[in-house]
C-alpha cells in the first residue's frame, strides 16, 4: 500500500482573492471564514514529503499557516501571476535545503525566467536569491515526485494550455475552460477530483459552476472539490447547500486525505 496523500487547500480564491480590495460586495464583507479565499494553491503531503502546486502571491502566508517547514518541490500549472507571484518566498526553504525542485512546462520556465531573472542567472548571482532545480514536464510524459508518479493533464484556459496533475486517486485541475477527450481519459477512475469553478455566470477562460458540475458528472469521482472561486459565486454556506452530495466548495485550510 502506498502512503495516503494529505491535501491541504492553501488558497481557493480566484486571482484577486476574497475579499477583493475595496469591494462592497456582500461576499467580500462576509464574516464567515470560509468566504475568505487566498489565491489558489494546494499542499500535498505524504510520509516526510511536501509538494505545493503553484506559488501564488499568498505563498508566504500560506506556508506559515500550514506550518510547512520543508518543501520538496513545486509543480506549476501555468505562468499567470496568481500562480507564480510568490516564488521568491521559497528562500527560507532554499537556505535550509539548497536548490528547490520545480516542475513546469518549458513555456512556463521561459516566463519565470523573464519575471524572476535573478533566480535563474548563473553569473554574479545575488547570494540571497534562491536557485531552482528545473525539471521540464509536458502533457504526454508522466514524471515522479519523490516516490509518487504524477500524470500531467492538459486543460485549456481559453487559448493557454495549463497542466493539471493526477497523483494516484487524486486529480487537481485549475484554470480550465475546456478539456479534450484524450486528456479526460487520464482522469477516469480518479476518486477525488479538484476542479475550478469561478462563479455562476459563464466566463471565457474558466468553468462556471454549471460547467464544473457537468464535468464532475462525466468523471463521476467519489468526491469533488471546487476551487479558484470568485466572490461572484456567492456565500460559501448557501452555495454548498445547492451542490450534489459528493461535491464540496473547497475553503482555505480544508484538509483531505486520499
Ligand atoms: Zn488562476
Image (cartoon, rainbow, N blue to C red):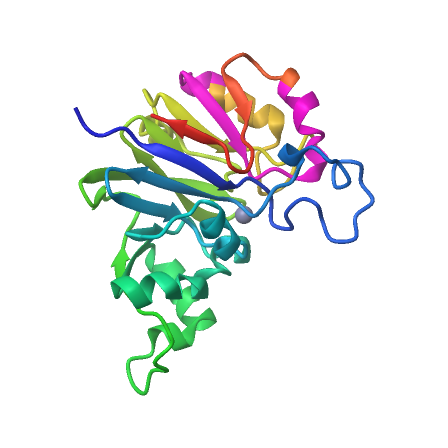
Assign the N terminus to one quadrant of the image. Answer: top left
Up the image or down, 226 lies above or below 11; here it is above
Up the image or down, 44 lies above or below 87; here it is above
In screen coordinates, is 212 left or right of 31?
left
Q: Residue furthest bottom?
A: 124
* 153 in magenta: no
Q: Indicate the position of residue 141 as horizontal and vertical percent values.
A: 23, 44
Residue lying at 45% horizontally and 54% vertically, measured from the top left = 55
Front residue of 81/25: it is: 25
Q: Residue furthest right?
A: 24
Residue lying at 56% horizontally and 33% vertically, measured from the top left = 251
Q: Indicate the position of residue 190 as horizontal and vertical percent values.
A: 34, 23
- The reply to whether residue 153 is in sight is no
- The reply to whether residue 198 is in sight is yes
Find the magenta span and give its range.
Answer: 217-240
Q: Indicate the position of residue 59 as horizontal and vertical percent values.
A: 49, 54
Amino acid at each position: 500500500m502506498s502512503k495516503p496523500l494529505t491535501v491541504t487547500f492553501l488558497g481557493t480564491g480566484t486571482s484577486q482573492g476574497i475579499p477583493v480590495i475595496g469591494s462592497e460586495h456582500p461576499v467580500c464583507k462576509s464574516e464567515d471564514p470560509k468566504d475568505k479565499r487566498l489565491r489558489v494553491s494546494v499542499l500535498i503531503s505524504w510520509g516526510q514529503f511536501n509538494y505545493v502546486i503553484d506559488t501564488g502571491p499568498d505563498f508566504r502566508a500560506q506556508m506559515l499557516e500550514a506550518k510547512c517547514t520543508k518543501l520538496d518541490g513545486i509543480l506549476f500549472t501555468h505562468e499567470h501571476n496568481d500562480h507564480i507571484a510568490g516564488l521568491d518566498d521559497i528562500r527560507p526553504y532554499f537556505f535550509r535545503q539548497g536548490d528547490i525542485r520545480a516542475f513546469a512546462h518549458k513555456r512556463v520556465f521561459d516566463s519565470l525566467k523573464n519575471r524572476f531573472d535573478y533566480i535563474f542567472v548563473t553569473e554574479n548571482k545575488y547570494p540571497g536569491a534562491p536557485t531552482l532545480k528545473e525539471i521540464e514536464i509536458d502533457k504526454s510524459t508522466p514524471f515522479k515526485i519523490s516516490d509518487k508518479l504524477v500524470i500531467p493533464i492538459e486543460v485549456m484556459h481559453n487559448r493557454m494550455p495549463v497542466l493539471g496533475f493526477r497523483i494516484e486517486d487524486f486529480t487537481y485541475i485549475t484554470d480550465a475552460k475546456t478539456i479534450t477527450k484524450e486528456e479526460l481519459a487520464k482522469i477516469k477512475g480518479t476518486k477525488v477530483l479538484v476542479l475550478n469553478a469561478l462563479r455562476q455566470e459563464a466566463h471565457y477562460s474558466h468553468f462556471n459552476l454549471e460547467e464544473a458540475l457537468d464535468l464532475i458528472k462525466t468523471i463521476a469521482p467519489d468526491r469533488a472539490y471546487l476551487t479558484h472561486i470568485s466572490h461572484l459565486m456567492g456565500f460559501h454556506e448557501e452555495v454548498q447547500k445547492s451542490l450534489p452530495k459528493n461535491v464540496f466548495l473547497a475553503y482555505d485550510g480544508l484538509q483531505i486525505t486520499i
